[in-house]
Image (cartoon, rainbow, N blue to C red):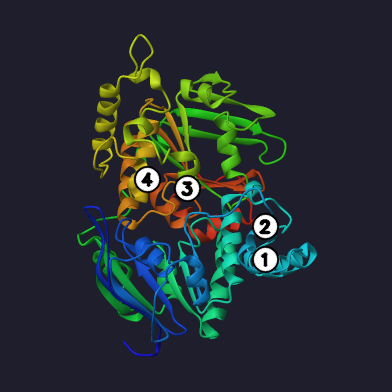
Amino acid sequence: MTHDFALEVTGISKAYGAIQALRDVSLGVRKGEIHALAGENGAGKSTLMNIIDGIVRPDAGEIRIRGEKVEIGSPARAQELGIGLVHQEIALCGGISVAENIFMAATNRRRSFFMNYGELREKARAILAELGSIDPDSLVGELTISEQQIVEIAKALTLDCSILILDEPTAALTEREAGKLFAIMAGLKARGISIIYISHRMAEIFAHCDRITVLRDGQHVSTDDIAAMTPESVVGKMVGRALGTLYPPKNPQSAQAPALMAVEGLSDGVRFKDISFELRRGEVLGVAGLIGAGRTEMALGICGLMPRSGGRIRLEGREVTPATYADSIANGIVYLSEDRKGSGVFLDLPIAANVSALDLGRVSTRLGFVDRAAEREQARCLGDLLRLRRGSLNDAVATLSGGNQQKVAIAKMLSVSPKVILLDEPTRGVDVGAKAEIHRILRELADQGTGIVVISSELPELIGLADRVIVIHEGGIAGEVTGTDMTEDRLIRLASGLSKDAGRAA
């Protein structure tokens, strides 16, 4: 390695007890390059970035910044050295404003007792203008996940860093928001700033990165120029095995299947209005639309998690009126939140306790006590069905990779034998191998007669997985596509309001 490198890590190793998270990993990032870091969940990417950012101390190895060996004992020290990290998981303070979150590091360094909040707001407004229209006075806790991700990115851009680490930065962004981020990245690169870009989205890596390093099982596999690679060759290095197709075969018979659930004129008066569609038995129905269009709110309204002002829901021909989520579960309709760690699983609870959480009555004695043996057996059966990679069923869910945490969330839904499953961004932030597994699981559930609704911002996922896609624009259904009409261009035009279906595609 030479002084052309802004960052060099050499021989980095880190173990957590018997688990070797990193083993003799070396990486060099050149000045003014966008360097992709790829690998399955659990490959060691986050551990390596946490070491570079001073959150975790390595057991062995060294770090050099612009050729000089450094010790990074804290995130504050990393910032002093010009390193900025945007975490995949949101790390903001929900009870204070957007502006205060963006300039939190600068505020902590101030010696003055008084804060000029007017100046703070205007600086925040200028930075946010590059990314999206978010009010700097808004409380962060009231923002959507995508808006919070934009605030995280804006916060990093204030640090005047020479090395910027972006961990899955577009996972919760719309196509438009992601486009703005890529333009900013190109500008930073032109100024000589080095960017480490972590993503499971191959299209983004190949469109915007210069080189790519692959980690597998905590070890360095390769570093190559993007021009010399293909998405298939990168995936092969990541998983170390033949992955097979990412999307399982669709069911052509679903088009003739009877309606399992019918939603008629569903509204809340503000965020979604006059929503009507049918979900057929054994169908995977995709839901597309820009973030903020009302997709999530519609799903919450169906499941009794958000008030409705009108409309009807029929399940197997019978009208159901879930006023609460408990009512929805009792009727056989379950929902998986896009915020896996906030609402999907209980990170600190054991795997078995998570799986049983929706209905403890299924694993309880007649006296009302939880039968732990029955609870573990339920978790074992569902875990085996979903090919859950785990240690003990008593281990906390936080010990699992992102993809396996998502499988626990799915197992929790399956524990109540649902008829309809609504999933919001089910593969957000999971690696390609885990995505393929989740796609397989959803198709198998559909083949068994379950109705599956998938909300996703990844258009290739909707096109590859869904039998049919409805598109939401400004709270209403803009159109429905299927077959050869199911293209990214068609979905984008409907989602952005550039076209409307004159009679939905058949």
Residue at 47%, 20% in the rendered image: 330
C-alpha span from label 2 to label 4:
28 Å
**Does dot 1 land on a helix, a strand or a loop?**
helix
Q: Residues within 10 Å of mark 4 (few under 14, many from 20)?
A: some
Of the 4 image quadrants, the one containing the N terminus is bottom left
Q: Residue at x 35, y 19 (%)?
A: 370
Q: Nearer the viewer, residue 232 or 305?
A: 305
Closer to the chain start, of discs 3 and 4, is: 4
Sequence-first tag of 4 and 1:
1
Eyeballing the image, is 412 above or below 61? above
Q: Are marks 2 and 1 in contact (CB under 8 Å)?
A: yes
Answer whether residue 449 is visible to the viewer in this image.
Answer: no
Q: Secondary structure at mark 4?
A: helix
Measured Cα–Cα span from mark 3 to mark 2: 25 Å
Relative to 277, is 216 on the left or the right? left
**Dot 3 or dot 1, earlier in sequence:** 1
The residue carrying mark 4 is 398
